[in-house]
Image: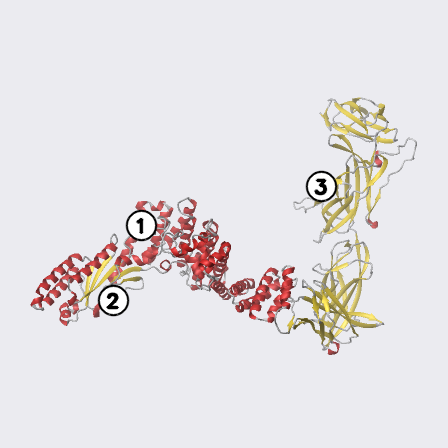
């Protein structure tokens, strides 16, 4: 398909000068003017004005009278406006009559009507067809042509008169008539030049060079006239007029074989101006003109080997096209335009090969073929969705889908009015044929008829051709051939289109080529899609093996199909008509995962081997196996089991088979499962690489361990096992196990998968191989790890199975200790509390999550000692501050990542419960990194729950503290939780609160209130003693505050009542001054409500 297939022929072909030839068509082919001149012939029966236009423009009645650029202009310029018009007339002595003269005059008059107001040159060629030798002699061979019209006419007249003199007397009257008509012919014909010749000398006329020169002058004058008119009329100031002027001027420059690129660029630069300024033109008109200009520019640049310039311009154009110019237009129109332009550039690049085609993706024709095909797919999909609700009506009106190869040309050109030679570029044609109007006028199809016709055709033939072109272009480049994902993607698209065309054989071929790559990379959705197409194609082609393979893969849980869909696929497989056959199983087809493994067992001092068979179903329904067989390298060990096996959906079947003592190497060749259903039997065969090696104790290996002890509890501890051998090994397995059966140590491989076995390949002599492992301990302490290595040693031409064991000890410890401090608060005003008392707890490392309370020195009991003091517990109505301090116990630095308080259902945290620590990068001290003995603290404010009123203390468990940390030299985090110690809480019947300001001014009085509230139904007596405070400076004692109020009093507080002791204080010193101390004792309950060692301070300003 040529690059300009989607555009009018007169627009895409190389423009030529136009010369019109009128009458006597047999002589037209004998005139030669060169490749740059196009000859337009007018037959004797045709009217000249029906071939060549007589007006500058015509419009259809159904079209609007204005637009940005007329579609017909290029056609008119290339087919309807001649630069030179040549009339060829025959002369015969018997034809000299009034009719002959009238015919010539008529054709000349018609020509004049066509070329009026134009600079078209008119020529008349008279060919003497007379058989009279005398007449030819009279004309003279050396004067066969004449360039003077008067001389030519005179000669014709003289010949005619001489011929008439030889006639009988009866012809005298006719002679006078001929002379009269000849004179009239001379007066009427005012052609540029008149030629007379005979047929034998027709090609020898010197007409070609004259016509070429006059034609060139015609277009040169036309360009000059356009430029003068544009400057004088101000067209340069109006973007639309400037665009029209520049497009036409560039086309004329192409006709003249001048450089038109500048004028096309100038026209293109007017496009953004039209978009920026509101006008009467629709966006569709504007971006259609831009599309035509883009085609012209790249079709000039690419053949000139300016591929990079063409690509840069095209990409800029397409970015604007997709973003702005196509905005607001129907999506199917947008994708049609994109498809046309991508295909055009791809065809141009393919027709003009360059070395860069294999280096850069954006300069490869394959890339643009791919884009064109994808846009065509989008166009087709959007069309189908737009017509989905009216599909039945569309089929009734336009017919069913056909395999028409011209579909895409129709849908992308005719339906978008790209080649219709009426109206203006980008404007929809509203005219409709009567027959079609009668069918669609009363239906909803009328609204979508511009795209409904596309459903009558099948575009896949063209789309698949473009995908194949893209694949072919990419295949020519070594660089693109190595991009397997790209090549497989294109081939998948090719397969999809062949599938849509129901060419299942080609579709199956392409799908089978690409699916293995998608399996290797794990593209589940793509594998599912391709397998569904393979399954359908195989069913249509009756290819049993590929149908069964794809069905099993789709039915297994390896892919993303819903369970019900997978069941229906498997049910269809069971009912599929085929003969019994054997199907080799591969990993991607394995609807059952089969595994065989040898396991040793020491019984009565003998080493007996067992063979473990594991079958794991990947199917969504139960499967019945009619038996299995296992073939070994030694046929005496072959196993044939006919007992049926039932495996439930997604479940596992295991069987333990005793093999006895094996003293030689034994290979498992294959495992076969027999599946009988209906009238056929399928056998699934696995080729398993399972080998048994007889064991001997060996001392040829040495084991060393690289790690950084100690192990932190709960962390993924990284270790490297280094095994050195003094002999070549052909492979083996390393097994890790804890010697203490109660130990819960877990082993992992380098992928963090739980595994205590690690296989290795062949090892050379005197070399060391390293196996990275991880282990995890959940408790602290020492533990012994045993390493068992089973391997093969090459001895001559035989392999000997050997066994090596060695143990090592590791120590795991807790990384942190924890100190917890609970600090009580006293209510001293609205939303204010004061810290008054503390309790200390320390985490005991070796006893797990247990705390021991730091004890204070106890005083001797006395009669005056209250039964309950404020320090012994905390009132439930006041918040408690919990300060937790984690202390590193490790010899290496650790980083604290986060600390989170996890409260239980009783306590609430009034402050943020968690904190994440980020590394410090600005040079300051990073407090989240702890060395041995260093600590990190965090405080939480706890709201305590309510407890029964009385003298009893209630222990409240606040919850847990979770700390996430890691080694500073590692990225593996580990989390530790501490169970927090209990808080002793009480709720006395007498509550106490204070109210005073936090700051005041020197010598300025302020109020201090002490409020006692009896919340019980009994009378309570409370003793209140106030102590003065003073400060000693330079052996002198100064009063800090002067106050007035009760210093020693006993209060009787009635039930459910409140008493307030007011005090008036005046500060005498500046700074933090201590308020008077109080001792408040409840006589009824023998409880201390306030001790004199509790102090409060107020800040005194100058």
Q: Which of marks 3 and 2 precedes in the sequence? A: 2
Q: Quadrant of the N terminus?
A: bottom left
Q: Given contact means CB atoms under 8 Å apart, are the residues at marks 1 and 2 in contact? A: no
The image shows residue 186 at horizontal and vertical percentages of 15, 59
- Of 269 and 372, nearer the camera is 372
Assess disc 1: are there few (<14), some (14-19) or many (≥20) residues with their C-alpha within 10 Å of its C-alpha: some
The image shows residue 862 at horizontal and vertical percentages of 92, 32
Callout 2 secondary element: helix
Give the left or right position of residue 1099, taking residue 63 as reference: right
Q: What distance separates the C-alpha of mark 1 from that of mark 2?
A: 38 Å
Label drawn at residue 227 = 1
Q: What distance separates the C-alpha of mark 3 from that of mark 1?
A: 79 Å
Assess disc 3: are there few (<14), some (14-19) or many (≥20) residues with their C-alpha within 10 Å of its C-alpha: few
The image shows residue 565 at horizontal and vertical percentages of 63, 61
| Residue beneath the point at 72% across and 42% down | 913
Callout 1 secondary element: helix
Q: Given contact means CB atoms under 8 Å apart, are the residues at marks 3 and 1 in contact? A: no
The image shows residue 488 at horizontal and vertical percentages of 55, 64
Q: Is residue 902 placed above or below 827 in the rendered structure?
A: below
Residue at the far left: name it: 169
Name the residue tied to disc 3.
912
Front of the two marks 1 and 2: 2
Callout 3 secondary element: loop
| Residue beneath the point at 62% across and 74% down | 579
Q: Which of marks 2 and 1 precedes in the sequence? A: 2
Q: Is residue 1036 visible?
A: yes
Assess disc 2: are there few (<14), some (14-19) or many (≥20) residues with their C-alpha within 10 Å of its C-alpha: some
Q: Quadrant of the C terminus?
A: top right
Label drawn at residue 27 = 2
Q: What distance separates the C-alpha of mark 2 from that of mark 3?
A: 103 Å
Q: Is residue 894 visible?
A: no
Give the left or right position of residue 1034, taking residue 283 as reference: right
């Amino acid at each position: 398909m040529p690059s300009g297939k989607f555009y009018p022929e007169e627009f895409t072909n190389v423009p030529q000068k136009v010369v019109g030839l009128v009458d006597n068509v047999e002589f037209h082919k004998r005139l030669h003017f060169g490749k740059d001149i196009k000859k337009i012939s007018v037959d004797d029966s045709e009217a000249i004005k029906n071939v060549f236009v007589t007006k500058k423009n015509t419009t259809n009645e159904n079209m609007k009278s204005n637009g940005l650029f007329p579609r017909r202009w290029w056609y008119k310029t290339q087919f309807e406006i001649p630069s030179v018009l040549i009339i060829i007339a025959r002369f015969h002595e018997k034809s000299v009559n009034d009719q002959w003269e009238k015919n010539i005059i008529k054709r000349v008059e018609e020509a004049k009507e066509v070329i009026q107001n134009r600079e078209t040159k008119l020529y008349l060629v008279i060919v003497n067809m007379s058989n009279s030798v005398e007449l030819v002699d009279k004309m003279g061979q050396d004067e066969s042509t004449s360039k003077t019209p008067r001389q030519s006419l005179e000669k014709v007249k003289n010949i005619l008169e001489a011929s008439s003199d030889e006639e009988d007397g009866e012809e005298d009257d006719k002679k006078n008539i001929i002379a009269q008509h000849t004179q009239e012919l001379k007066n009427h014909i005012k052609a540029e030049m008149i030629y007379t010749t005979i047929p034998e000398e027709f090609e020898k006329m010197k007409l070609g060079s004259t016509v070429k020169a006059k034609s060139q002058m015609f277009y040169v004058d036309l360009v000059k006239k356009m430029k003068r008119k544009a400057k004088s009329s101000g067209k340069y100031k109006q973007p639309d007029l400037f665009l029209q002027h520049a497009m036409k001027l560039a086309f004329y420059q192409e006709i003249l074989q001048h450089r038109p690129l500048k004028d096309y660029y100038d026209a293109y630069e007017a496009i953004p101006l039209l978009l920026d300024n509101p006008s009467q033109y629709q966006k569709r008109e504007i971006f259609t003109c831009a599309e035509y200009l883009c085609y012209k520019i790249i079709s000039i640049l690419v053949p000139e080997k300016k591929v990079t310039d063409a690509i840069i311009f095209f990409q800029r154009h397409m970015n604007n096209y997709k973003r702005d110019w196509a905005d607001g237009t129907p999506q199917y129109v947008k994708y049609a335009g994109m498809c046309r332009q991508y295909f055009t550039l791809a065809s141009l690049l393919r027709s003009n090969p360059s070395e860069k085609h294999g280096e850069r993706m954006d300069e490869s024709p394959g890339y643009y073929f791919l884009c064109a095909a994808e846009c065509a797919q989008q166009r087709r999909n959007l069309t189908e969705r737009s017509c989905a609700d009216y599909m039945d009506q569309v089929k009734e009106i336009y017919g069913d889908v056909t395999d028409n190869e011209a579909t895409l040309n129709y849908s992308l050109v005719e339906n978008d009015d790209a080649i219709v030679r009426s109206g203006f570029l980008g404007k929809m044609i509203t005219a409709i044929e009567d027959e079609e109007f009668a069918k669609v006028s009363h239906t909803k199809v009328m609204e979508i008829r511009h795209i409904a016709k596309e459903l009558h055709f099948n575009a896949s033939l063209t789309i698949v051709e473009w995908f194949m072109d893209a694949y072919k272009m990419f295949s020519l480049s070594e660089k693109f051939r190595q991009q397997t994902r790209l090549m497989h993607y294109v081939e998948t698209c090719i397969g999809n289109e062949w599938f849509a065309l129901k060419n299942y054989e080609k579709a199956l071929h392409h799908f089978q080529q690409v699916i293995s790559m998608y399996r290797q990379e794990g593209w589940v959705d793509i594998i599912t899609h391709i397998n569904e197409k393979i399954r359908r194609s195989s069913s249509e082609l009756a290819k049993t093996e590929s149908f069964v393979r794809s069905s099993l893969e789709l039915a297994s849980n390896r892919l993303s199909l819903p369970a019900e869909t997978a069941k229906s696929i498997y049910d269809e497989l069971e009912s599929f008509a085929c003969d019994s056959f054997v199907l080799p199983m591969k990993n991607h087809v394995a609807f059952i995962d089969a595994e065989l493994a040898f396991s040793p067992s020491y019984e009565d001092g003998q080493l007996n081997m067992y063979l473990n068979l594991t079958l794991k179903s990947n199917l969504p329904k139960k499967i019945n196996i009619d038996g299995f067989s296992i073939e070994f390298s030694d046929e005496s060990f072959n196993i044939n089991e006919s007992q049926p096996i039932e495996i439930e959906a997604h479940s596992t079947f295991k069987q333990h088979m005793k093999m006895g003592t094996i003293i030689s190497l034994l290979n498992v060749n294959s495992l076969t499962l027999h599946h009988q259903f209906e009238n056929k039997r399928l056998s699934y065969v696995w080729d398993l690489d399972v080998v048994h090696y007889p064991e001997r104790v060996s001392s040829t290996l040495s084991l060393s361990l690289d790690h950084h002890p100690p192990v932190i509890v709960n962390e993924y501890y990284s270790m490297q096992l280094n095994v050195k051998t003094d002999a070549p090994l052909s492979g083996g397995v390393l097994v890790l196990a804890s010697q203490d059966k109660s130990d819960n140590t877990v082993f992992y491989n380098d992928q963090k998968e739980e595994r205590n076995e690690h296989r290795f390949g062949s090892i050379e002599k005197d070399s060391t191989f390293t196996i990275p492992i991880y282990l995890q301990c959940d408790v602290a302490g020492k533990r012994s790890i045993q390493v068992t290595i089973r391997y093969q040693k090459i001895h001559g031409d035989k392999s000997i199975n050997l066994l090596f064991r060695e143990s090592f000890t590791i120590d795991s410890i807790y990384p942190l200790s924890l100190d917890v401090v609970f600090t009580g608060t006293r209510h001293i005003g609205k939303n204010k509390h004061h810290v008054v008392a503390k309790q200390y707890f320390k985490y005991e490392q070796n006893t797990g999550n247990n705390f021991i309370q730091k004890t204070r020195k106890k005083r001797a009991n006395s009669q005056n000692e209250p039964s309950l003091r404020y320090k012994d517990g905390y009132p439930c109505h006041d918040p408690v501050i919990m300060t937790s301090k984690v202390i590193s116990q490790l010899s290496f630095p650790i980083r604290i990542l986060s600390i989170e308080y996890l409260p239980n259902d009783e306590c609430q945290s009034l402050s943020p419960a968690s904190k994440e620590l980020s590394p410090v990068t600005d040079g300051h001290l990073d407090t989240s990194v702890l060395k041995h003995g260093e600590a990190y603290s965090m405080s939480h404010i706890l709201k305590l729950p309510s407890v029964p009123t009385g003298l009893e203390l209630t222990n409240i468990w606040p919850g847990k503290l979770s700390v996430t940390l890691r080694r500073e030299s590692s990225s593996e985090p580990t989390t530790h939780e501490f169970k927090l110690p209990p808080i002793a809480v009480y709720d006395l019947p007498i509550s106490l609160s204070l109210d005073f300001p936090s700051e005041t001014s020197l010598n300025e009085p302020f109020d201090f209130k002490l409020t006692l509230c009896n919340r019980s139904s009994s009378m309570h007596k409370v003793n209140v003693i106030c102590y003065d405070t003073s400060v000693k400076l330079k052996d002198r004692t100064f009063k800090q505050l002067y106050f007035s109020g009760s210093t020693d009093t006993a209060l009787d507080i009635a039930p459910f009542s409140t008493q307030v002791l007011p005090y008036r204080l005046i500060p005498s010193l500046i700074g933090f001054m201590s308020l008077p101390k109080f001792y408040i004792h409840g006589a009824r309950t023998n409880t201390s409500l306030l001790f004199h060692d509790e102090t409060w301070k107020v800040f005194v300003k100058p």
